[in-house]
Image: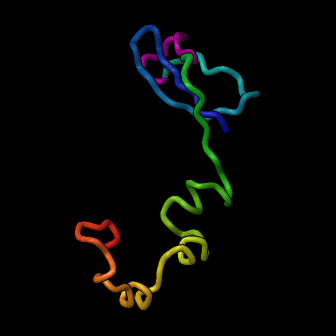
């Protein structure tokens, strides 16, 4: 559902409102009650709902199995020999 920026041209009050595209316009300012509340031209903004989106499923590292497969096990890092690396290497 789109999120729109509104501003009152009388008192300057600003608010973001989540509105359906088909919803009627909001004309009355919630602050001063004048009929001067209108949509501002701004960058598109929307909210994703449901599962399968980055913000809901993957943002906090809760991906099932995909991040764990890429991580090396502690046994493999213990067997790496520092003697094979040059001084100042980036692997340790």
Look at 44% across and 87% down and name the residue there: 76
**Residue furthest toward the right?**
22
| Location of residue 19 in the rendering, given as x and y in whole percent from the top left corner | 65, 32
Which residue is more in the foreground, 40 or 53?
Answer: 53
| Location of residue 81 in the rendering, given as x and y in whole percent from the top left corner | 33, 86
| Location of residue 51 in the rendering, given as x and y in whole percent from the top left corner | 67, 60
Which residue is more in the foreground, 3 or 52?
Answer: 52
**Magenta residues (range):** 30-39
The picture quadrant where one finds residue 75 is bottom left
Which residue is more in the foreground, 50 or 83?
Answer: 83
The picture quadrant where one finds residue 91 is bottom left
Q: Is residue 4 above or below residue 32?
A: below
Horizontal relation, residue 76 to residue 70: left or right: left
Look at 57% across and 77% down and name the residue there: 69
Can residue 60 be found in the magenta stretch? no
Q: Most prominent secondary structure in the magenta stretch?
A: loop
The count of marks equals: 0
Q: Give the colour scheme of this rendering.
A: rainbow
Q: Is residue 62 above or below residue 21?
A: below
Q: Locate the C terminus and report the quarter of the image it occupies.
A: bottom left
Can residue 35 be found in the magenta stretch? yes
The picture quadrant where one finds residue 1 is top right
Horizontal relation, residue 11 to residue 35: left or right: left
Look at 41% across and 20% down and name the residue there: 13
Horizontal relation, residue 52 to residue 89: left or right: right
Look at 38% across and 90% down and name the residue there: 79
Q: Is residue 73 above or below residue 90?
A: below
| Location of residue 21 in the rendering, given as x and y in whole percent from the top left corner | 72, 28
């Amino acid at each position: 559902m789109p999120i729109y920026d509104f501003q009152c041209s009388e008192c300057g009050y600003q608010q973001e409102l989540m509105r359906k595209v088909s919803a009627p316009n909001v004309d009355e300012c919630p602050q001063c009650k004048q009929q001067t509340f209108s949509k501002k031209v701004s960058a598109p903004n929307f909210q994703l709902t449901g599962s399968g989106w980055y913000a809901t499923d993957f943002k906090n590292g809760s991906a099932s199995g995909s991040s764990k497969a890429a991580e090396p096990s502690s046994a493999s890092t213990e067997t790496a020999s520092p003697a094979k690396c040059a001084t100042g290497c980036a692997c340790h």
